[in-house]
Image (cartoon, rainbow, N blue to C red):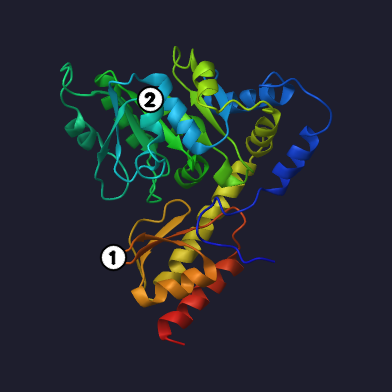
Amino acid sequence: MQRRMFASDNASGAHPAVIEALRAANEGHAYAYGDDEWTRAAEEVLKRHLGETARPFFVFNGTGANATALAAVMRPYEAVICPATAHINVDECGAPERFSGGKLIPIATPDGRLTPELVEQAIFGVGSEHHSQPRVVSISQASEYGTVYSPEQIAALAEVAHAHRMLLHVDGARISNAAASSGSSLRRLLTDSGVDVVSFGGTKNGMLYGEAVVFLREGLGEDFRFVRKQGAQLASKMRFIAAQFVALFGSDLWLANARHANEMARLLADGMSSLGIRITQPVEANEVFAILPRESIEPLVREFGFYVWDERSGEVRWVTSWDTTPGDVSEFVEAARRVLSGA
């Protein structure tokens, strides 16, 4: 069997229950573009998690979810305030800006998390025709540093955003890991905390592909079906995305997967700490950031596969998945021990 990697939770395969759901959905014919029983069932599943006012729309991937979600709630002269490390700012090739026409305002943060104070400092030029008008605050939950916002922290950001007539968007690619870490329900973490729209992730937690854009405030998303189509995110055979959501979120499988991935990250961090490796960020979800001696990075990357986060400092990122085992972690830690000792 091929060795499991620590590069990304995108490197893992799909959970067997998801594969079985896809197999079952493959039987017979169904109406296209979401007019099918699986899509209706998946919409109800997400409403049970997020509340009856939630309006879910299924899309292909995370970049598509973020780009279309933002395009649906802002105009080209408006702006998004986000952490400098945000996926929308660093890893989406300008897609949110291209599809929304708006501007991203990246804010430096020590741990990937925005605070109300940082948001307030970034709001300027309101009403001036010479400046992009602030419209959205966007955060990632969990953040790109693996840190997690508490419901109270999200509520504080929502309060600031709404006070300035702005919206709060959450990039929830790892929303399941965040919920598992915080011990909060998805509704408490999102709807009840004042989030307006969420890019709701499934791929990183055991799905083959597929995400959802979910509008949580009434009056939002009225025209999203047009934005989704124009953004090339409308699946003709949508039942295959929807069936995966039902398999993952129709039971506690999403939570079990996320808890396990988080536990493996803590196990990995503890193992590497025992070797004297400095962990640079709190391990709150399924990502571990650490500083490795430069000479040890290449042999470990070659053997296990992971990404260098900051080449200047030697900071690396390890990501655990729903299918990472304690044996995988032990094997990596032992390999690191050998490399660090010069064996």
Instruction: Decide if residue 286 is on the left or right side of residue 124.
Output: right
Outermost residue, bottom direction? 343
Res 188 seen here: no
Q: Residues within 10 Å of mark 1 (few under 14, many from 20)?
A: few
Tell me the amino acid under the disc marked 2: Ser
46 and 188: which is toward the camera:
46
Q: Is residue 338 above or below residue 87?
A: below
Image coordinates of residue 293 in percent, x first then y, are 34, 74
Could you tell me how far apart the alpha carbons at marks 2 and 1 are, in whole angstroms?
35 Å
105 and 160: which is toward the camera:
105
Could you say which quadrant of the image residue 18 lies in? top right
Q: Residues within 10 Å of mark 2 (few under 14, many from 20)?
A: many
SS for dot 1: loop
Q: Residue at x 60, y 54 (%)?
A: 12
Res 331 seen here: yes
Instruction: Tell me which label, 2 or 1, sits earlier in the chain.
Output: 2
266 and 25: which is toward the camera:
25
- Foreground label between 2 and 1: 2
Image coordinates of residue 219 in percent, x first then y, are 44, 12
Quick one: quadrant of the N terminus? bottom right
Tell me the amino acid under the disc marked 1: Ser
Instruction: Decide if residue 63 is on the left or right side of residue 18.
Output: left
SS for dot 2: helix
In the picture of the structure, the residue carrying the numbered disc 2 is 100
Image coordinates of residue 257 in percent, x first then y, are 60, 48
The number of numbered badges drawn on the structure is 2
In the picture of the structure, the residue carrying the numbered disc 1 is 313
Q: Residue at x 41, y 80 (%)?
A: 340
Q: Is residue 269 above or below residue 48?
A: below
Q: Residue at x 81, y 25 (%)?
A: 29
Could you say which quadrant of the image residue 194 lies in? top left
Image coordinates of residue 43 in percent, x first then y, are 62, 24
